């Protein structure tokens, strides 16, 4: 007979079995890479810092990076008091100096808590950031579920962790941009734009990573102050409270307001 094609009828069970077999042959989808965390310790009173500040303006636009600028205070005696400087930022940099067994300096770029370099070496800094982004693991993914009362942070256990392998969970609140006209000191006459200027850093909790994470963060804490950006960083605490970043996420504040 003409005009008739052969066809087969598959039961739902047979179709499901066939799809399962096909799926098993396909390569697993790669885990979504988490953003790398790039921290710059800078000063308005340091003439070496403007190139690093400009680099952070560039890096802050990347979706695969959480860029954070910390203005320190120990150069204030040079003739210009940093308008964004905080002693807490200096203390965080000092913790990194102890962790890396090195001195503190500006501009210091810390890449994912794993390495550091002068941020004024712009090309090398870009390369270090790109290299880290290409190697960060997608696991454990840090998920921030928005609730009526704030957020719930969730992450899976980290394979190979031991109970004394503690990570610190940090809430970092920042302003997305500040423009500062500097009239004295080494950068007198300069107007510098700073991106993702950190205003508050709060250690929310510690996590030993052997069990899944579930942590509630109240809306009042997230909304405190006039900051328009928030990030959550989970990093190995070690002896000094800082170390390699395990996972991180940037919060969408429009969903929390």
Image (spheres, rainbow, N blue to C red):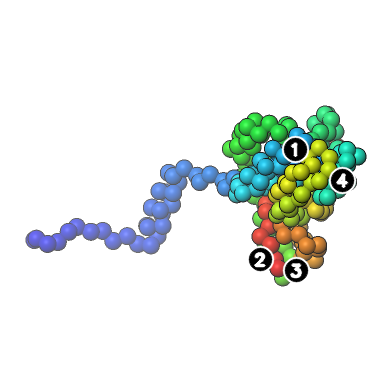
The foreground one among 87 and 243 is: 87
Mark 2 or mark 1: name the one nearer the start of the chain.
Answer: 1
Per the image, label 4 sits on a secondary structure element best described as loop
Give the vertical position of 204 relative to 129 (above or below): below
Per the image, label 3 sits on a secondary structure element best described as loop
Distance, label 2 to label 4, CA atoms, is: 36 Å
Distance, label 1 to label 3, CA atoms, is: 40 Å
Mark 1 or 3: the one toward you? 1
Distance, label 2 to label 1, CA atoms, is: 35 Å
Q: Residue 245, position in %: x, y? A: 72, 42
- Is residue 201 shown left or right of residue 176? right
Mark 2 or mark 3: name the one nearer the start of the chain.
Answer: 3
- Is residue 2 shown left or right of residue 139? left
| Quarter location, residue 124 | top right
Q: Residues within 10 Å of mark 2 (few under 14, many from 20)?
A: few
Per the image, label 1 sits on a secondary structure element best described as loop
Mark 2 or mark 4: name the one nearer the start of the chain.
Answer: 4
Mark 1 or mark 3: name the one nearer the start of the chain.
Answer: 1
Mark 2 or 3: the one toward you? 2
Residue named by callout 3: 149
Residue named by callout 4: 81
Residue named by callout 2: 255
Q: Residue at left 83%, top 43%?
A: 184
The answer to whether residue 7 is seen in the rendering is yes
Q: Residue 98, position in %: x, y? A: 85, 33
Mark 4 or mark 3: name the one nearer the start of the chain.
Answer: 4
Q: Exactly how many numbered labels are in the figure?
A: 4
């Amino acid at each position: 007979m003409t005009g008739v094609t052969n066809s087969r009828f598959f039961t739902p069970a047979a179709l499901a079995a066939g799809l399962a077999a096909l799926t098993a042959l396909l390569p697993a989808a790669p885990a979504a890479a988490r953003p790398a965390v790039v921290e710059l310790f800078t000063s308005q009173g340091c003439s070496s810092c403007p190139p690093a500040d400009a680099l952070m303006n560039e890096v802050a636009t990347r979706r695969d990076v959480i860029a954070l600028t910390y203005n320190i205070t120990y150069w204030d005696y040079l003739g210009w008091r940093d308008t964004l400087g905080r002693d807490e930022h200096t203390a965080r940099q000092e913790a990194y100096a102890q962790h890396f067994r090195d001195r503190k300096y500006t501009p210091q770029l810390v890449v994912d808590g794993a390495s550091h370099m002068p941020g004024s070496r712009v090309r090398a800094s870009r390369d270090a950031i790109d290299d880290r982004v290409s190697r960060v693991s997608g696991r454990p993914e840090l998920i921030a579920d928005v609730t009526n009362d704030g957020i719930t942070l969730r992450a899976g256990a980290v394979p190979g962790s031991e109970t004394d392998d503690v990570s610190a969970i940090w809430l970092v609140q920042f302003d997305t941009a500040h423009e500062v006209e500097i009239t004295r000191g080494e950068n007198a006459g300069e107007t510098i734009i700073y991106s993702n200027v950190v205003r508050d850093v709060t250690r929310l909790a510690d996590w030993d990573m052997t069990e899944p994470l579930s942590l509630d963060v109240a809306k009042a804490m997230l909304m405190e102050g006039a900051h328009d950006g928030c990030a959550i960083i989970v990093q190995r605490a070690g002896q000094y409270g800082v170390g390699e970043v395990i996972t991180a996420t940037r919060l969408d504040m429009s969903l929390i307001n």
